[in-house]
Each structure stands twice: as C-alpha cells, then as structure tokens.
Amino acid sequence: MWRSDLRSAFLAKLPTGGRIADIGCGAGADTSFFAAAGLSVLALDKCERAIGQIPHQPNVTAVCAELETFDFELCAFSGIWACAVLCFLPRDRFEVSFDRLWLSLRRPGVLAITMPMVDSARLVGPKRLLGITECQMREFLERHRPSSVQVSVYWSQRHLSRLRWFIAMVEK
Ligand SMILES: C[S@@+](CC[C@H](N)C(=O)[O-])C[C@H]1O[C@@H](n2cnc3c(N)ncnc32)[C@H](O)[C@@H]1O
C-alpha cells in the first residue's frame, strides 16, 4: 500500500465539511495533499523546523506543539490523520494521548492512525518506536466504541528498516 492509497482511503471515509488535523505532520506532505483537496487543516508537530517547512496555504494552520499538551477543542475535527506519530510516545502516554484525539473528533468522523506492527517497544534504527499487535490495537479501539474499525497492513516504503505497519481507520 502506498501513501497515496492511505490518503485516498482516508478521504473516502471522511464526512463532508469540517476541518481535519494532521498530527505529527512533519514537513507537511500529507497536510499539503489534504489542503489541495480543499480541506481545512490544522497541522501540528512538536518540531519547529518541520513546521517551518510547511508551504504556506490559506486553508492550513500550522502549530508547533506536543500532542500530549496541545489544547484540542472537543469535537473540532471531522477527520484526524495521525501517521507515524503515536509510535513515538512512551507506552504509558499512548492511551491518554489517543483519548485526547478521540475527544476532539466529531461524530461522524474518522481517525486514521499508523503504527508499527510488532509485539512491544523495540529498537528501530536510532529511534525507539512503540509497536502494537493488530489484536491489541483492535481490543484497544473497541473500548472506544467506534462505529467501525478497518485495519490494513502494509510495508513501510520510507523507513530505514523494513517494518510492517498497519493503518487503522476508526470511524466514530
Ligand atoms: C516519522 S515522522 C512522521 C511525519 C508524517 N506524519 C509522515 O507520516 O510522513 C514523526 C513526526 O511526529 C512528530 N512528533 C513526534 N512526537 C510528537 C508529539 N508528541 N507531538 C507532536 N509531534 C510529534 C515528529 O516531530 C515528526 O515530525
């Protein structure tokens, strides 16, 4: 599955209208794609340099902040794209951070998250990534009573070590 497939799957599930958030947006490749598709995007990343690289677009608000502490409005977004970001959290911050995103999602709305598909934290290149099994992820998501969960597995095209990742499209 290519990045363009992941984006299209997200767009296909997105309710019309409303804003979306790109959490851990990096230099904004996905943000720019969604903005070009006509969406209004909050692009959030804790790295100032990455935020500075996001091209200026009138429908993009770029914010340098940590997802654990940013003051998300309740039910603010019809879609949240959190690609390769929750895996950088310490394990004990994962659930509370997920909850913050979930509360800022409207109903109906869709949250897309990608995570490495492994059993536990392990070293990947120079960084320590949090991994989770598909089964653990499904159990975790079900506790939030989503209206649907669709999990697709793919091989990362972008990371140093070939890692199996999954994308979960969680509809509220
Ligand atoms: C691997 S990059 C992914 C970038 C982009 N989402 C993508 O898929 O290409 C991870 C990004 O998440 C950001 N990040 C990591 N932890 C974060 C946190 N707690 N709050 C906000 N951003 C974070 C990093 O600064 C980095 O830009």
Image (cartoon, rainbow, N blue to C red):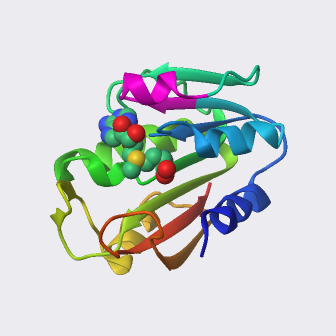
Q: Measured from the top left, where is residue 58 in percent x and y? A: 76, 19
Query: Which one is nearer the viewer's eye here, 54 or 143?
Result: 54
Q: In which quarter of the image is residue 13?
A: bottom right
Q: In this view, does 54 lie to the left or right of 118?
A: right
In this rendering, is residue 145 above or below 21? below
Q: Measured from the top left, where is residue 42 in percent x and y? A: 60, 29
The region drawn magenta spans 43-54
Q: Quadrant of residue 62?
A: top right
Query: Which one is nearer the viewer's eye here, 76 or 24?
Result: 24
Confirm whether residue 167 shows in the render.
Answer: yes
Q: Measured from the top left, where is residue 65 in percent x and y? A: 39, 23
Quarter containing the C terminus: bottom right
Q: Quadrant of ligand 1?
A: top left
Residue visible at 58% across and 28% down in the picture: 54
Confirm whether residue 121 shows in the render.
Answer: no
Tally the numbered discs. Answer: 0
Residue visible at 40% across and 25% down in the picture: 49
Magenta-span inclusion, residue 46: yes
In this rendering, is residue 63 above or below 99? above
In this rendering, is residue 8 above or below 138? above
